[in-house]
Image: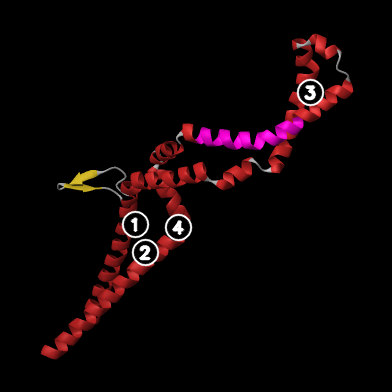
Amino acid sequence: MPLAESCLVILVAALGGLLFSVFTVKLLFRPHVSQKLFGLELQGILPSMMPALAGYASAKLGEKFENSTDLSKKIADPELLEELKPTIEAHVDSFLKVRLKEAFPLLANFMGEKTLLKFKEAFLTEVQIILPDLLISYSKKFFKQLNLQESIAAELKLVDLVALEKLIRDKAGNQLKFFYFAGTLLGSLIGLIQVILVNVYSNTFY
């Protein structure tokens, strides 16, 4: 086979490898919506898998949140309770100094500062004891009522596929370039093998 024809075969094969890799990447994302072509239903791999991925991810995340011991630990974290302490103290002070006098004026007249302080300390101690368990119990009921799995699945199904494709292309730009290069290189190798086989065949039989 002449050199020009050999180079042309290798070039065409390389171009074929590049086009195949570009088409493969396109097929990951496009078409976003299911379309029919010659009776066949076509849809991008990622868009077609989104409902299944949404169901799987929501189930796993929902289970993790509902049964997570880490979540319980974070809610009952002493540092978090310490952050809540000023707010709780302010409410206790307001109750003892304002609302108690309004609700029980006679009782409030017999309570001095020391008595109020003891009441405050007793309230705060009790709150520190019951609040962690109360928060954990409420959070579990809240997540069950929220139906977290369905909420997550619904949100994932609403993901903008165009924006997702752009994000993946932006973040995986180098990997995609390497994939295109690998496709071109593979096509070139296939073309080179074809040229070698043709030359060997020609020399053998002619």
The answer to whether residue 33 is left or right of residue 103 is left
Q: Earlier in the sequence, mark 1 or mark 4?
A: 1
Q: Whole-percent x and y of residue 22?
A: 32, 59
**Where does label 3 land, which residue?**
93
Q: Which residues are magenta?
A: 124-143
Name the residue at 47% across, 31% down: 145
Tell me if label 1 and label 2 are in contact, CB under 8 Å.
yes
Q: Nearer the viewer, residue 58 or 170?
A: 58
Please identify the dominant SS of the magenta region: helix
Q: Is residue 189 magenta?
A: no
The correct choice, above or below, for 156 with respect to 107 in the image is below
Residue type at tag 1: Val
Residue type at tag 4: Ala
* Numbered disc 4: secondary structure: loop
**Where does label 2 land, which residue?**
180
Q: Earlier in the sequence, mark 2 or mark 3?
A: 3
